[in-house]
Image: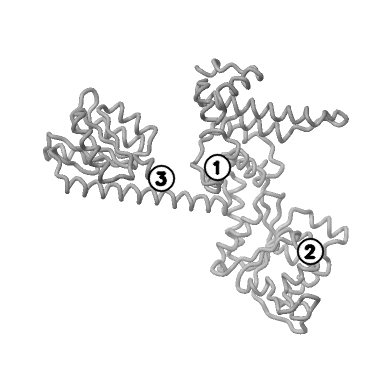
Amino acid sequence: MQERISILIVDDEEDFARGLSRMLSAQYPGYNCRYVTTVSEAMEELRYKDVALVISDLRMPEQDGWDLLQQVKVIQPETNVVVITAYGSIESAVQALKYGAYDFLTKPVEEERFFSVVDKVLERYHLLAENRRLRRRTDCHEAANELIGQSPVMQKLRHSLEKVATTDYTVLIRGESGTGKELAARMIHNLSERSKREMVTVNCPAIPGELLESELFGHVRGAFTGADRNHQGLFERADKGTLLLDEIGDISSTLQTKLLRMLQEQEIRPVGSNRSVKVDVRVVATTNQELESKISQGTFREDLFYRLNVLQVVVPPLRERKEDIPLLVDAFLRQVCHEMGLPELRIDPSVLSYLSTREWSGNVRELLNFVRRLVVFCPGEEIGLSLVHFLDSSEQFQPEKGAIVPYKEAKSRVVDEFTRTYVQELLRQTKGNISEAAQLSGLERVSLQKILRRLNIQAEEWKS
């Protein structure tokens, strides 16, 4: 990263600026030490490069150092400015510091003092950069582990979870797939008196029925073929903490009976053992199924339902909180860029408007996965509406029943749509500059021109 960070000298005395640049290059070889002679040139550098330090004269033609000081704080707020001038005075120094300068030096430059100031500025810059990195990392972690949204239904949900967390009763969390039921369970645990202990999560449908009993209650050596040692179950592991039974509606009738006994007696019996073990566990269960229907069908015990349903929380689907979608997209965008080690991407406001009106049958999980695809396929630094439409058309491309087209034709349609979207985004970002678009995409200029002709795309339309 250091090769990309600049130290910028701004002085209309070109010989002085060049000499200072050479001196800094020798002292700080890891930095890109540059000089310019006008404030407008400095602004151009600041807009397109990471600048750790600006060393500026005060008196310059057209715009002076005072103008530069104010503009630096707008373009790169964390860039430090050291003012260096031949017209030193206490008044000037005080005014420069008021304008936001880090320090004030006079010509001729005293080398030891000068390098001391530069050392402190660079140290401060990298400390702030590290703090930003850690803050983004924390924000991403929090975004991935919290319920995001300020809609009325989400505020009501948070209030319910806070109330539920103050008790030690069993909780049943209901909601459609992908709404964030597990996050709601974690919030209950984190706000409860059990938060210092572990919250253990078991995905009930993911574990075969014959193994789930052993996972939950444990087993003793010799209980079954392959049981060559004692195994501690998840209930014991969660002692004094919380056990989340994710998608409880899928457990077998035998396991339902053992779970009911555990909730009644607060004790478990490992598979193959003749003794019970007392446990202190708060149980939180989630389901996306209508357990009442399963009760009427005889596949779920009614008495277990009432044991689990002491307190009930319902997590709303995304269609009932569409005003939260821009907040979710923003948080997910930061999270995904962090996951992929990418700089944060911008997103066109029209994309947020579109995503807020789109149907999300898979709820928040589907939205997160869609954002992941947007980041993966984004050709530049901003996610535009054309990319969204392309991904939507690719996912929704389904031939009508009885009208199946040949595989090659179907594939050609999808590839052409992707190519059209990709090329249009390239031209938009490069303002129709074919050479720049070719360089950015990694294509030969001639190849790109052939693509444009084949798809009847006119680069001139993007130059405006």
Q: Is residue 150 left or right of residue 215?
A: left
Could you tell me which secondary element the residue under label 2 belongs to?
A: loop
**Based on the displayed image, in which of its 4 quarters is residue 8 positioned?**
top left
Callout 1, which amino acid? Leu
- The tag earlier along the polypeptide, 1 or 3, is 3
Q: Which residue is drawn at 64% across and 52% down?
A: 180
Q: Which amino acid does label 3 sit on?
A: Met
- Dot 3, crowdedness within 10 Å: few (<14), some or many (≥20)? few
Please name the residue that numbered disc 3 is placed on: 1
Separation of residues labelled 1 and 3 (CA atoms): 23 Å
Relative to 219, does residue 16 appear above or below in the rendering? above
Q: In this view, does 73 lie above or below 182?
A: above
What residue is rendered at 54% in x and 31% in y? 348
Dot placed on the residue nearer the N-terminal end, 1 or 2: 2
Q: Which of 413 and 167 is in front in this view?
A: 413
Q: Mark 1 points at which residue?
A: 333
Who's the residue at 65% across and 34% down the image?
A: 357
